[in-house]
Amino acid sequence: MIAIVLTMYTVFARRASFLVIMGFVVVIVAACILATTIYTQQTLGLIQNVLIKHHLLKAYQSYRILTWLDPSFSQDQYGYNIHMAQTAIGSGQLFGEGYGKGVLTSGGWVPNQWTDYIFSAIGEEFGFVGSAILVLLFLVLCYRLIRIAQTTIDPFGMYIAIGVVGMFSFQVFENIGADMYLSPSTGITLPFISYGGTSLAIDYLAVGLVLSVGLRRRKIRFQTIEHKGRSL
């Protein structure tokens, strides 16, 4: 929800507000980079001694952040899923091992590979090339949605289109990033790829809303047709 709101706000905000929002985003990203690279131990201590101790985070939430900050943390238990997912992606190398031939994914070594970690199966079976094609298809989808938002004259329809772009962009980054230690695992599905009836239905409904906005970019023009002496 925050990703959707920020996307819509940065598009329609005035220049001063836009700069403030972008500055806030840059600070958050910089803080995450510093936490994961330079001040890793201090961040781990903050989570363990403050956030967990004072019940500001639930146990499973803290473990997801800890495994993101420290890839070696509890690889046999809490960090097992993400560790095996990254190993599967790396084993695919350039062209992958072939459809259905992934040793780790087909052998069931990667848990939840049909939902949260679906990208690990794609990376192992189709390699870097197949993974890059998938990311390219998502970029094309977002580009087409942005084009609809640019050409519509309805402000509300524009908000819908931009919000859907923010939703898809964040889902793709979060799901793929979680498989490669770029972001914490949050259980967000990969649009149109991960198994799940509700998430798939919402994705199609979101695209349908944007297509509806695209169909109404121009006013309907009625034509008079003469049919057997009567005008229709």
Image (cartoon, helix red, strand yellow):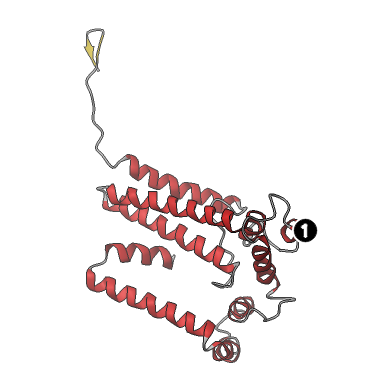
List x then y, in percent, for residue 151: 28, 47
List x then y, in percent, for residue 68: 59, 77
Task: Name which quarter of the figure residue 186 lies in.
Answer: bottom right
In this rendering, the answer to whether 70 lies above or below 220 is: below
Task: Name which quarter of the figure residue 164 lies in.
Answer: bottom left
In this rendering, the answer to whether 161 lies above or below 13 is: above
In the visual, does 217 lie left or right of 4?
A: left
Residue at 48% across / 84% down in the picture?
34
In the visual, does 161 lie left or right of 84?
A: left
Look at label 1 and name its amino acid.
Answer: Gly
Find numbered disc 1 in the image and state the secondary structure of the residue it sits on. loop
List x then y, in percent, for residue 83: 67, 71
User: Residue pushed farthest front?
Assistant: 94
Q: According to the image, label 1 marks what residue?
A: 107
In this rendering, the count of numbered labels is: 1
Q: Nearer the viewer, residue 162 or 147?
A: 147
Residue at 40% across / 46% down in the picture?
209
In the visual, does 39 lie left or right of 71?
A: left
User: Residue pushed farthest top?
Assistant: 228
In this rendering, the answer to whether 100 lies above or below 57 is: above
Q: Nearer the viewer, residue 60 or 132?
A: 132
